């Protein structure tokens, strides 16, 4: 009969060894397994230049992002700080609008970003235009609003990265909320000092028939245009956790170097996917992500131990909670490139714990 401890170990062993950082090879291996591939597909820039991501793919990716952000902030909502930043519309071209937020000194030092929410006030559609829409059903008279982070680059063309997307009704008005946590994270990791946060807001029609082909152009947000200012201006809500007060939740102090004498904690590590050659033209979203790693030491009990455990070693700092990483990748179906959503498990460390080397870590499963 198989020992109970061995049965436990079969499902509970950590996927990342003590002190081991997430590598590009591990991400690549997870992608190949998810897509049942033996090697990286051969894709050139021409395969993805004209590639359009369908609405259902965008919606699936955004849903997985929101789920990941919810898992990250769960249990911390009562200890977080709130700060609001006012934004302004910088430029408008057709159905695409550029929004800018000055971010200097907006994020408190020694803090962890839990969530960032963009709030836009959707203005009512004029009555005359609504009368023209009466022949449409409420389900059809809607548009898709997509939020992307815009990265201004000196060494090449600017890049955008999808962060949120949702449907809005043309029959409704009021504040609309978008999760832009990924955008603020990208800004923290990749932007130059004092560079503002740039968000690109696009409005497209969603499953609308020919009579309503231009209905999405009726969607407008307050403060757009030269005369709009003040009331209903765009707002960015920043929810952060004070690590000085709540560092016991498991995060390392970013201002203190991690040494061998430091206690077990979770350290911020940014993985730049666009810096990996194999990801070119294959990984469409995200451009990178915060993975975190477990570092530091654990207190060791006195010897001899009052019990015996097979292959028991010293206590190590290891991941005990993880979440998945959603991605949009390019795959070839019928010889044509198409975008597809995949979710790689155990890519983001949520919590670190001390465990015996050789002992299984009871891992909290994702919902």
Image: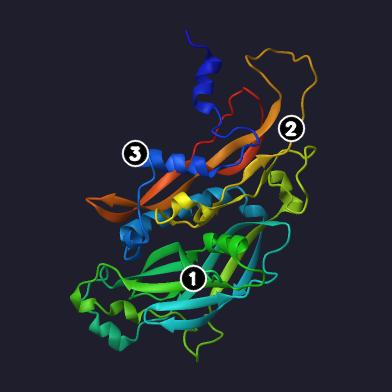
The circle on residue 298 is: 2
First reached walking from the N terminus: tag 3 or tag 1: 3
Which residue is located at x 35 percent, y 47 percent? 41
Q: Position of residue 150 (x, y in %)?
A: 50, 70
Structural crowding at the residue carrying mark 1, measured as other residues with C-alpha within 10 Å and reported as few (<14), some (14–19) or many (≥20): few
Q: Quickly name the residue at label 1.
A: 158
- Mark 3: give few (<14), some (14-19) or many (20+) Cα within 10 Å: few
Callout 2 environment at 10 Å: few (<14), some (14 to 19), or many (20+)? many
Whole-angstrom CA distance, mark 3 to mark 1, is 33 Å
Q: Secondary structure at mark 2?
A: loop
Asked if the residue at tag 2 contacts the one at tag 3, i.e. Cβ–Cβ closer than 8 Å, the answer is no
Sequence-wise, the earlier of marks 1 and 2 is 1
Please tell me whether mark 1 sits on a helix, a strand or a loop.
Answer: loop
Asked if residue 260 lies left or right of residue 140, the reply is right
Q: Residue at x 32, y 63 (%)?
A: 51
Pinpoint residue 230: horizontal percent, then vertical percent.
56, 85
Q: CA distance from mark 3 to mark 2?
A: 39 Å
Question: Which residue is tagged 3?
Answer: 36
Q: Is residue 31 left or right of residue 6?
A: left
């Amino acid at each position: 009969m198989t020992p109970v401890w061995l049965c436990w170990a079969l499902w509970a062993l950590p996927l990342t060894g003590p002190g081991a950082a997430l590598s590009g090879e591990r991400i690549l291996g997870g992608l190949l397994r998810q897509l049942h591939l033996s090697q990286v597909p051969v894709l050139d820039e021409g395969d993805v230049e004209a590639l359009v991501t369908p609405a259902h793919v965008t919606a699936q990716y955004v849903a997985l992002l929101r789920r990941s952000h919810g898992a990250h902030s769960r249990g911390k909502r009562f200890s977080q700080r709130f700060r609001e930043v006012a934004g302004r519309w910088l430029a408008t071209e057709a159905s695409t609008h550029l929004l800018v937020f000055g971010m200097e000194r907006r994020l408190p030092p020694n803090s962890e970003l839990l969530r960032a929410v963009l709030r836009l006030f959707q203005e009512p559609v004029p009555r005359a235009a609504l009368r023209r829409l009466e022949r449409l059903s409420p389900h059809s008279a809607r548009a898709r609003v997509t939020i992307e982070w815009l990265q201004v680059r000196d060494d090449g063309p600017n890049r955008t990265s999808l962060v949120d997307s949702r449907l809005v009704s043309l029959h409704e008005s009021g504040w609309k909320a978008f999760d832009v946590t990924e955008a603020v994270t990208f800004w923290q990791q990749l932007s130059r000092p004092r560079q503002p946060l740039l968000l690109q807001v696009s409005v497209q029609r969603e499953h609308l028939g020919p009579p309503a082909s231009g209905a999405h152009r009726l969607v407008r947000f307050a403060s757009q245009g030269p005369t709009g200012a003040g009331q209903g201006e765009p707002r960015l809500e920043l929810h952060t956790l004070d690590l000085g007060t709540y560092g016991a939740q498991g995060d390392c102090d970013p201002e203190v170097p991690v040494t061998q004498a430091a206690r077990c904690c979770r350290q911020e590590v940014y993985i730049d996917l666009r810096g990996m050659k194999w990801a070119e033209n294959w990984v469409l979203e995200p451009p990178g992500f915060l993975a975190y790693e477990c570092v530091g030491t654990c207190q060791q009990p006195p010897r001899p131990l009052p019990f015996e455990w097979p292959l028991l070693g010293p206590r190590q700092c290891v991941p005990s909670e993880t979440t998945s990483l959603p991605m949009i990748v390019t795959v070839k179906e019928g010889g044509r490139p198409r975008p597809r959503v995949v979710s790689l498990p155990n890519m983001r460390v949520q919590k670190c714990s001390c465990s015996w080397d050789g002992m299984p870590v009871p891992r909290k499963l994702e919902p």
